[in-house]
Amino acid sequence: MAKLSYKVSYYVLYVMFAAILVVLGLFYLGGDAQGAAVLTSVDSEMWQPAQTDTLIYLTYGLLAVAIIATLVGVLFQFGSSLKDNPGAALKSLIGLVILIVVVVIAWSMGSDQPLNIPGYSGTDNVPFWLKVTDMFLYTIYILFAGTVLAIIFSSIKKKLS
């Protein structure tokens, strides 16, 4: 079974690499935006690639694949561990629980005050999206700090033992 999952993940990885290379090629070599795709609010001197939407949709797709793969992996690991060792299965969920706690804390830290952005009249300067943006930023900061602390403490522990 392990060989089948390895082969599937191997081919999926190369299909994703190919899709990324094709879309990046279209983005960089696909020319300028024409017609309705041209943003009039952007300086005419700036380059507006024709395939920007394709690149954004690819990014959304890769994010969705990463989230789904992570959740499926956690569930399979939990399910297989639950049969053999229920205590270890519950310990495997600690990382997921910590991540959820960090996201909730980051959400509560986020500001919902609308920003004063000169020249911007879009619809995204609303409390929900401002809190989401702050949540992602604070989550990145907290997880980065946790990673640095884990590296420091693991090297200290390794030196002491």
Image (cartoon, rainbow, N blue to C red):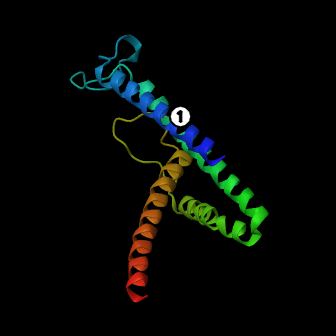
Indicate the quadrant where residue 117 lies: top left
Identity of the residue furthest to the top in this view: 35
Please report the residue visible at 65 percent of the width from the left and 65 percent of the height from the top. Answer: 92
Quickly name the residue at label 1.
61
Count the numbered circles shown: 1
In screen coordinates, is 142 left or right of 34? Answer: right
Identity of the residue furthest to the right in this view: 83
Identity of the residue furthest to the bottom in this view: 160
Mark 1 closeness class: few <14, some 14–19, many ≥20 residues within 10 Å: few
Indicate the quadrant where residue 35 lies: top left
**Where does residue 70 sit, x and y in percent of width and height?**
59, 50
**Where does residue 67 sit, x and y in percent of width and height?**
58, 46
Indicate the quadrant where residue 34 lies: top left
Residues 158 and 21: in front is 158
Q: Is residue 41 above or below residue 127?
A: above
In screen coordinates, is 88 left or right of 48? Answer: right
**SS for tag 1?**
helix
The amino acid on which the numbered mark 1 sits, given as a three-letter code, is Gly
Q: Is residue 81 above or below residue 14?
A: below
Please report the residue visible at 64 percent of the width from the left and 68 percent of the height from the top. Answer: 94
> The C terminus lies in which quarter of the figure?
bottom left
Residues 56 and 125: in front is 56
Please report the residue visible at 40 percent of the width from the left and 72 percent of the height from the top. Answer: 151
In screen coordinates, is 69 left or right of 23? Answer: right
**Where does residue 93 sit, x and y in percent of width and height?**
66, 64
**Where does residue 74 sit, x and y in percent of width and height?**
65, 55
Please report the residue visible at 39 percent of the width from the left and 17 percent of the height from the top. Answer: 37
